[in-house]
Structure formats: structure tokens, C-alpha cells
Image (spheres, coloured by chain):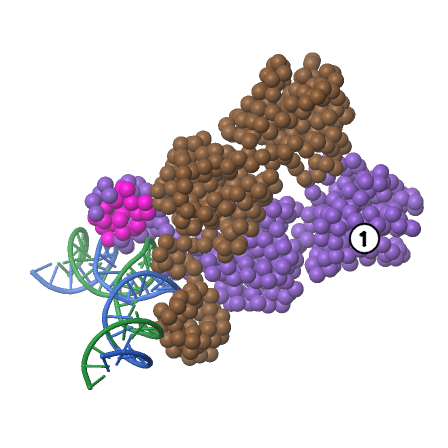
Chain colours: A purple, B brown, C blue, D green
Amino acid sequence: MDSAAQVARARPTLRDVAQLAGVSPKTVSRVVNGEPGVSPSKAGAVERAIRQLEYRPNITASSLRRAGGRTAAIAAVLEDVSNPFSSALYRALEDVAHARDVMVFAGSVEEDPDRERALVRAFAMRQADAMLIVPASDNQAYLTREVVGGTPLVFVDRPPVGLHADAVLVDNETGAADAVRHLVAHGHRDIAYLGDLRTIATARRRFQGYKEALSDHGIRPVHVVHDLHTSEAAATAFGALLDGPSAPTACFSAQNLITIGAIRALRSRGLQHRVAIAGFDDFPLADLLEPAVTVVSQDPYRMGRVAADLLFRRLDGEDWEPTTHLVDTRLIVRGSGEIAGPGGVRSA
Amino acid sequence: MDSAAQVARARPTLRDVAQLAGVSPKTVSRVVNGEPGVSPSKAGAVERAIRQLEYRPNITASSLRRAGGRTAAIAAVLEDVSNPFSSALYRALEDVAHARDVMVFAGSVEEDPDRERALVRAFAMRQADAMLIVPASDNQAYLTREVVGGTPLVFVDRPPVGLHADAVLVDNETGAADAVRHLVAHGHRDIAYLGDLRTIATARRRFQGYKEALSDHGIRPVHVVHDLHTSEAAATAFGALLDGPSAPTACFSAQNLITIGAIRALRSRGLQHRVAIAGFDDFPLADLLEPAVTVVSQDPYRMGRVAADLLFRRLDGEDWEPTTHLVDTRLIVRGSGEIAGPGGVRSA
DNA sequence: ACACTCCTTGACATCGTTGTCAAACGAGTC
DNA sequence: GACTCGTTTGACAACGATGTCAAGGAGTGT
């Protein structure tokens, strides 16, 4: 094989570089990996050959032989990559990984525990260096195998069950209680609860926060709907409450898609300025709606950053007892949560 | 190494399975890959050993040795993985890939041509089987190398320049012209144009469509602003037009983030029911705004599906002259584009 | 000149798996 | 029994790159 043919080779290998530079493959490897112990003249010849051939290292081959077997790729097991929370997590992970020349894979679980397991397996078969997991399953003891194998894991949004692992969570109870207390402070006593699937840990905690805030004011929950998972379901369920014999004067919606559905139900009845609503989690354009929507907001980008930092610290060899990091929520007052209720406004 | 120690081994290899089953590694490989020519008794022993050891094939090792070197991973070079258009593309790619046990990597380019090239290189070093590219660069001739190397490519949203490759595009000119004609039909003559970076091919085409629609009615463009890339920039620029000596009665906004900025400018001046607006591309909750926003909508999920199908057909060995697929836009009438202009409503 | 030390270099095995090809075995036929 | 054919099996090299370790050369000191 002559020099012209080497130039034309679609995927030049490290051996091709070695041949062109007149050195051994190991010397090329030393240059590529920045190892000391290569003479300047040989290093120069290698670098010229790399440029001429446009050699690109093959990371899959390198990872197989290299100590530690790193693939420079990490994985995210997300709820649905196209929803804003998931895509913000993805972007945060990507930004931290990019600074370390690490790429990110992701897959969408759609609340299916079997899909979660299959994704973890698929990523492990591709030797992902670490994984961020938004779990759908109710027990993650099956992941012990990854932990034992040395793959760092971090759970986001929902805590791990049956496994000792790092987690980045939002204080769902406090956030929910804050929203409900805000509605109470604006005179509401009959505050409906619209919640997500009870199988989801975060939904259960938000319901807990709702109940606690009501209880603090001696209020009993009357209108409670669980297991809503889409905007459409929420619109239908809330519509039924609004059309019923004793409609609530306010609503705490425990998830942003559900908030959107509840708003549609209010608007379709012309009640958007009459019934107060506060939602858990923000969503794009909430401030442009009429009335603008009061929410308790979480910050998925920041959660993703915290999670990525944990993964990379573990990949860097740091070792510590698995810990849970709580990221604060923030009440954003915009209008929908301040519509006065029959009890009048009182100090929060 | 005895059987108990094998069970405890974090990453059992195909050799471990072979040893436990009492066969050669090649026989295990035959069973794992569904190759014929293994006796039922040996296949059974292999399957039992696989279950006992929880053996998972190592795809990086397999891809290195296997004919064709497939990694069962494809890559998406997107504008910003956290924006809805990009994340819908990703999700579409993922859904098609999932059916074929192929995983997806992505990276965000943020309109930076250098970042685009770096991402392509990073994916190639990881042996991505194929790539979907939303290009930021103004010339993609550098990708000839991937094409020659046999990696299928498909361009989405913006056509390839300097390279012959498949593309999935929206008919930006027709879509823009439709929106503008709609505004004209509602009596508007002074229709502002708010557009994205002129370096972006789709922005240029939408401007072309805007001009053509005006020209069809003998209207000259008066208020034209290019190179807006954020909501904030759009709000500022449109605000200046609205506050100026001769404000436009309507606006064609050529990108959804820009539409959102324009709406903020209108609302902050109480003009949202006075000045008509039609935007290019839909966004979540456009129908819940006041007035609800008239848009020309594209369908990124469908674009992603079409692109994924093309990639997988090429990966399956099909060969055809690179083609461009146009996905239609759709005018969605909601209110903001129907505010009457000084010329009265006339038939479209 | 000889011995010792340090630096550079390259031979060769390795990583986990698959492709190639030959050997062994069993069944059927003459 | 000898021969042929088909099936099963496994030895071994290969993939692209890195880890290990020994050899060779240059420089220094006695």
C-alpha cells in the first residue's frame, strides 16, 4: 500500500500512521495520548502523518484495551426526552460532559419499568461510563449490579428504592405546601387537588404537602383527583369538578401538564378569572396566559448540573457515602393564584 | 476461578460463559447471535450459563470485530437539545431506533459551525452508525469523508451545501407566504417582518416567502428586521417598530421564539388585540394566549421520523440518489392573525 | 575500557468478541 | 469395510488500540 492509497483510505488506523511516520504503533499511541518519552523528531513525524492521513482515534477500540475501559460516553434514562423537564436535564448533562469531551446518550422511559430496565441494559452493553436515571420502576435493586461493576449512578427527581445511590431531588412536599398555603392566604378553603399517577413518588409527596398545608389550617380535603397523566385527562377531571354541585374555588395542580389541562377547563367555562389556580412546576409562556399562572417552580437545568457534577466526581475517583441533594423550589406569583377566595385575603 | 467466583464477577465475559457451559467461546457466540449449527444440548447449556452469570454482550468489543463494525448507535447533531423542535426530532429518531435496538446520542450546536464539526468528529470517533444533522455551518463539504466512509447522513430543516446528501425540509417559502397572504386577506398592507439570523438558510427562505406574498399584492416591504435570535431581541426590535412614527398594523414573525418576543412587545403596550400577528412555527400553549396565536406549523416529530427512516434504509443497504423530502406546513387559524387591518377583509 | 543509569523504542500480548477454516463425528450408501 | 456427505465444533487469527517489559543506545563516572 503506497502513500496515495493511504490518503484515500476512508478510516486510517494507528498502524497506517505508524507506517507513514516510520515508527512503531506504540510510539504513535504515545504521541496521540500525550505520553512522555518520544523524541521530538519522531513526535514530529507522527504528527505530520496524523495530519496527512486525517487520522481519528477509534474510541471503541481504545476503550476495550485501555485501563478502566472508559468509552467517554454517559447515559440518561429520562421520562420523555421531548418534554421540557427531560430535555433541560439532558442539556445540563451535555454541557457538563462537553467540557470533558464526553458524549451523552439518552432514552425515554414513559413511566414503563420494563423500558427502564431495557434502557439500562442497552446502555451497559455499550459500556456507558455512568448513568443518570429518572426512575419509573418502584424498586431499583436490580441496579446493584451496575454499582458493583463500578458504574456511577445518580437518581434525579425521584429517589432510589432498594439501592443506595446519589440522588438530586426537589423538596416536593414543601413546594406543594407553599402553593397551597398561598391559596389559603388568598381566602380559599375549598382547594381541589389534581395529581399525577400515584405510582410516581413525586406525585405522592406533592399530595402529602397539599394535605399538610390544608391540615395546618384545619381544612379537610374534599376534591381530590389522582392518576391524571395528561393535559386532556386533567381538563376532563377538573371540568367535572367545576360542573359539579359544589365546585372548588381554587385548585392546586401537582404537575405542569395537569396545570395546563386545568387552565383549559377554566377557560372553556369562562372561569379563569374566578377560580384560583397554583401549579407545581413552571412551563413556557405561563406568564403570557390570562391570567398569568402562579406556580411553584423547579429548575431542571440546575438539577441536571448537580447530577452531572456528582457523576463526574465519582468518575474522577472520589468516593463518599451516597447522598441526596435537595434543590429548592420557588413560588412565582403571577395572577392566577391571587384571585380572591370567599374567606378574604389573610397574611401568609 | 471457581463457579462462585464467576457468579460474583461484575462483568462476565463470553469466555466465562463458555467455561461454565463446557464449550468453546465460538459456540457461545453462535448461541448469542442466533447462528444455526449448535446442538440443542449445547445450546441449552450455554443458555443456562448465560442466565446464571447474567452475561451481557459487550457491543463495543463486538463492533470492533464484527463485519461492518456496527455499534448500534446513531447520532443527532441538533441546534439545542432542550428546545422543543430539537427534542421532538430526537424523540422521533429514538422511537424509530428503539424498534431496531439502536441507541441515540445527541449534541447541541448552538449555531456554532466549529461546534458542529467537533460534534461530528466526536461521534465518528465513537463509530456512530449514522448521523442526523441540523447544520449550523454554511458548507458541509467536510462531511464528504463520512459519506466516503459509508456513514449515512441526513440533513434536517436546512439543506446541505457542498455535499450531496439526503435532506428532510419544510417548504419554508410556501409556509411563510401562506401566513403573509392570510394577513393580507385580513386587510393588512403594512406587515412587519421579524426574522432570525440571515446566516440560517431557513430564515432566508422565510424572508423570500414573505417578500413574494407581498409582491403578489403589489405591496413593498417597509418594516424588516433580520438577525433576531432570541425572544428578548425580538421584543426589543418589535417594540421599537410599534413605538415608531409609522407602526405596522401586522407582523409576520419567522420563528417561534421570535413570535413569543413579539407577543410580549404587543402585550406590554396593550396592542395584542389591535395589531395582527402570524408566526412561523407553532409553540406550546399558543392556543391559550389572548388572543390565541395564528401560526404556520411544522411538524418536527414527523420530520424526525422521515429522517430516521431514510437513515435506516441506507443502513439496511438500500442505495439511491440523495433526495430531498419536503414536509408540509399547516396554517392554524386561532385569532391573532385575523385581527382586521385598515384595508378590510377580502377573500384569500 | 568497563559498569551503571536513564531515556527511548518497539515486540508482543491483551481487551471481548467474531470470521475463517479445518478437523472430527455420525449417518448413509455401495 | 471404505467412501462420501452433512453437521457440529473448536482452534486460531483478527479487529484497533494500549499495557508491559526488555533491549538498545547515549551519557557519565571510575
Q: Is residue B130 magenta?
A: no
Query: Mark 1: which amino acid?
Result: Tyr
Give the magenta-colored segment's residue range: A6-24
Q: Say whether residue A241 is left or right of residue A135.
A: right
Counting from the top left corner in percent of width and height, residue A78 is at 60, 53
| Residue B251 in sight here | no
Residue at the spot 38% in from the left edge and 36% down from the top edge? B142
**Mark 1 belongs to which subunit?**
A
Q: Say whether residue B181 is left or right of residue C16.
A: right
Is A166 placed above or below B272 here? below
Counting from the top left corner in percent of width and height, residue B160 is at 45, 34
Is B9 placed above or below B299 here? below
Residue at the spot 77% in from the left edge and 25% down from the top edge? B273
Dividing the picture into quadrants, the one containing residue A109 is: bottom right
Residue at the spot 58% in from the left edge and 20% down from the top edge? B211
Counting from the top left corner in percent of width and height, residue B65 is at 35, 59
Counting from the top left corner in percent of width and height, residue D28 is at 19, 54
Q: Say whether residue A5 is left or right of residue A260.
A: left
Instruction: Give the class, few, some or many, for how many residues have Cα within 10 Å of label 1's Cα (few <14, many ≥20).
Output: many
Dividing the picture into quadrants, the one containing residue B300 is: top right
